[in-house]
Amino acid sequence: MDSLITFAAFFGLALLVWDCVDVGRNDAANLVNAVFGARVMKRRRAVWLAGLAVVVGAVFSSAVMETARKGVFTPGMLDELLGDMSRWGAITIYISVYLVDTVLLYTYSAFGMPVSTTATLVFSLVGAAVGVSGAMDIVSWDKVGTILIAIVVSIILSGISGFLAQRAFRGAIRDKAEDHETVMLHGPWVAGIIFTWLFWFLVMKGLHSVPIVQLIKKQTFEIYNTYAILLVAWAILATIIYMILKILGERGTKYLFHSTAIVGMLCMAFAFGQNDLANCASPGLSAFYIYGHPDVSVGAATKIDISKWLLFFCGSLIVIGMTTKNAQRVTRAEVNTGSQFDQVALWAPQWCRSLASLFVKKHDPEIVIAPDPSTTETGKRIHYDTLRASVIMAVSASVIAFASSKGYPVSTTYVAFAAVVATGWGDRVFDRGDADLKLGRAIWVVTSWFIAGFLAMFAAGVVAFLVYRLTWLGFVVCTLANLGTRYYFKRRADRHEATYHPKRPKPGVASAGGDDDPEDHD
């Protein structure tokens, strides 16, 4: 058994590397979709810039790490239920989560479908814990319920905030986000609001445990009225922005919302590093610590602190996943779903499109207040303007940072997708063209989230049961099943890609998005 546990612990570390890359393929695509959709930056540059913020955010993920490590189930109960086999049972649970999650994340990414690492982790832990122990009460059902409620609330909050902010800002700026006079009039207060709420949610909430932040809160927010301080901060920031715009002139007004979009992307990437990194890193690291401390109980082993350097390493692996072909597919599909263009390259089942058509028909077409569809000098589509990209990033980052401060591992994917759709609704881009296809795709994505949760729970339970009881044979069978499933869906996804997104001949002039542009065959 000792040799089996040793192998399993190191196998878990290998799966950790695998899972971090797959998380980068899927979840991390959300970090750059708005900036890329607005053509603020080339995708490759945006990925590496966001990746730096992910790695930095990794060192602030302790609260979520504790939730992911031992919040979903009670590891200490394994000592009572399994006795001498408790260490093997705990390691089996954590490894089974990876064997299932890597397949789900890879498959969804291959088809360009965003899925939640958080949701699949929670459901996988539930299924694996029950599969090993055979006891339903090992699961902390109250905690699971709280996490799921937090996920749902975060989606609703992101959707409502995104819609209201986009409608308000668009009502003031209209389609003139780069017009000098309009930006001079409205840009300072709009950008001031964006920077103020990013400061509040990301710094004061997301980094509330940092000593300097605690000191600032103690000297200001705990003495004076919070809303008054935020109002003053907004006024100061708006004034500073106005003065900068006066100095820079038309160049400053042209790129103001480019700047807010990039800052929002960095903040969201930082929040992602706080939240989702902990989710994908905790099972493998916990399994290895259980292996490394055979003299203590399973419950005690999961309480050991995890080095920030290990989290830093895991964050670097996620960045590698962000550069892959599948990540580009996820970015492209998410951008097209909320695009202001009438016709887009997407796929959705017919029943989703039919349901979306019924919903669309209930509303009379209104005047679209988003900018007219346009392209770059090299012919690449500009799916959002920089104002909308700024709102998407700022709302998503704020919601995720706030949830992380409370220790809730909410879904970056769900929050970002809700912001994309909600801001599109605010701009009324779903009232024309391929509205049924875009909304149908959104319905299909949301439906697939539920499917992924149930698949994760059932599959993890089966895998954990087989590995725990068949030991070496279980490892071989489940690993081969993982590889075989990945290969099968890779072939299907590639055929799907060739059918719905055929590659265009490369033009003589390089595209604005570079060779890795996910819209080369949009």
Image (cartoon, rainbow, N blue to C red):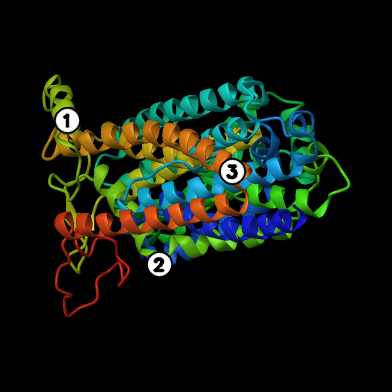
Q: CA distance from mark 3 to mark 1?
A: 34 Å
Disc 2 marks which amino acid?
Answer: Arg
Q: Position of residue 147 (x, y in %)?
A: 57, 28
Residue 243 in view of the camera = no
Residue at screen point 52% across, 49% down? 99
Q: Amino acid at mark 3?
A: Asn
Instruction: Determine which quarter of the picture holds residue 441.
Output: top left
- Pointer 3 local density, CA inside 10 Å: few below 14, some 14–19, many at least 20: many
Earlier-in-chain disc, 3 versus 1 = 3
SS of the residue under disc 2? helix
Q: In which quadrant will I find the C terminus?
A: bottom left
Q: Marks 2 and 3, how far apart in space?
A: 23 Å
Numbered disc 1: secondary structure: helix
Asked which secondary structure carries label 3, the reply is: helix
Q: Nearer the viewer, mark 2 or mark 3?
A: 3
At x 67%, y 32%, the residue is 71
How would you rate the neighbour count of disc 2 (Cα within 10 Å): few for under 14, some for 14-19, many for 20 or more? some
Give residue 198's quadrant in the image. top right
Q: What residue is shown with label 1? A: 351
Q: Position of residue 42 (x, y in %)?
A: 36, 65
Q: Is residue 394 shown to the viewer in this render? A: yes
Q: Amino acid at mark 1?
A: Trp
The residue nearer to you, when weighing 484 against 235, is 484
Frontmost of labels 2 and 1 is 1
Horizontal relation, residue 225 to residue 32: left or right: right
Residue at position x 45%, y 41% in the image: 116
Considering depth in this image, is 376 or 77 the residue closer to the camera?
77
Q: Which residue has dot 2 on it? A: 44
Q: Earlier in the sequence, mark 2 or mark 3?
A: 2
Residue, disc 3: 275
> Which numbered disc flags the more N-terminal residue, 2 or 1?
2
